[in-house]
Amino acid sequence: MYKETNKRSIVKGVTWRVVATTTTMIIVYVFFGRLDLAIATGLIESVLKVGLFWLHEKAWFKVRWGKKRIEPFNLWFTGLPLSGKTTIADKVFEALEHLQIPIERIDSKDVRELIPNIGYSREDRNRHMHRIGNLICTLQKNSISTVASFVSPYKVSRQAIREMVKNNIVVYVKADVETCKSRDYKGAYAKALSGEFKNFPGVNEVYEEPQHAEIIIDTDTQSADEAAIIIVKYVKKHYIR
C-alpha cells in the first residue's frame, strides 16, 4: 500500500501550475496587451492555486467514497517435491509485485532455515503448517497478501490453512513422480529411494492430492510461464478488479 506524501503532492501541484499559469498569462496578454499585468496575474494565481490544489488533494485522500479495498489473499502452492511449485510461485509473485499491492513471498525452504529441526513426520508437518497459517494471518491483518509454496502433503493441514486464512487459493502443481525424479538436480529422490531421507512424499510417504483446488497446473503440459499467466489472471479476476 502506497501513501501520497506531502512532498509528492506539492511537486505535482507546482508542475501543474507551471502549465496552467503560463496559459493564463498568455490569455491576459492577448486580451490586454500588457506584459506586467499578465505576469502579476500569473504570480498571484500560482500562489493561490498551488495551495488550493494541495488542500483539495488532502481532502480527497481522507474521503473513502470511490475507493475499493483490496482484500488480502493467500496463494497456496502445493505439490510433490520438485513438481515446479517454487519456480511458478516466484514468477507469480514477481508479476503481482508489479501491480503495486502489498504482498510477501513465503517458501518452505526459507522458513525451515529460520526454524531448524522442524522434522518431517506427519505430526511435525501438520504442526508446522499451523505456524505458517498464523504467520499468514498476521500478514493479512496488515492487509498483506501472500504467495506460499509448501509440499503440504496432507489434506488435514491444507484444510487447516483454508480455515485459518482469508481468501485462500489452492494451486495444485501437478506432476508425475517420474517427471519430478527427472528434475531431481539435488538428488533428493535418490536419497529417499536409498532410505537416507525418511517421510519423503511420493517415495516413502503419501501425498494426498487436493480434491478442491481452485487452480490445477499440470507441469507435464504447461510451462512455468504459462502457469504464471493463468494464476495471475485468476487473481486479477477475483481479487484485483
Image: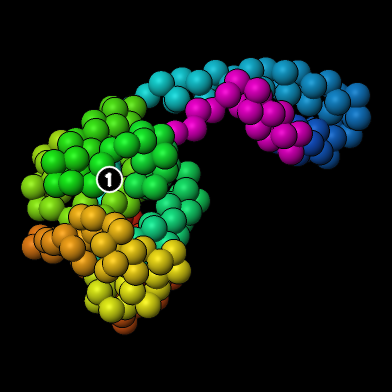
Q: Residue at x 27, y 45 (%)?
A: 74
Locate the N terminus by quadrant: top left
Quick one: 152 or 48, which is closer to the camera? 152
Q: Quadrant of residue 117?
A: top left
Q: Does 151 appear above or below 230? A: above
Q: Is residue 234 visible?
A: no
Q: How is the image coloured?
A: rainbow
User: Where does residue 213 sit, x and y in percent of width and height?
Assistant: 15, 60
Image side of residue 90 versus residue 37, left or right: left
Image side of residue 233 versus residue 97, left or right: left
Residue found at the far bottom of this picture: 221
Q: Residues within 10 Å of mark 1 (few under 14, many from 20)?
A: many
Is 3 part of what is drawn in magenta?
yes
Quick one: 196 or 125, which is closer to the camera? 196
Q: Quadrant of residue 105?
A: top left
Q: Residue at x 60, y 20 (%)?
A: 6
User: Where does residue 236 sit, x and y in percent of width and height?
Assistant: 33, 55
Q: Which residues are magenta?
A: 1-19
Q: Name the residue tied to disc 1.
A: 74
Q: Is residue 135 visible?
A: yes
Q: Quadrant of residue 222?
A: bottom left
Q: Residue at x 41, y 34 (%)?
A: 114
Q: Residue at x 91, y 30 (%)?
A: 35
User: Where does residue 85 sit, x and y in percent of width and height?
Assistant: 34, 61
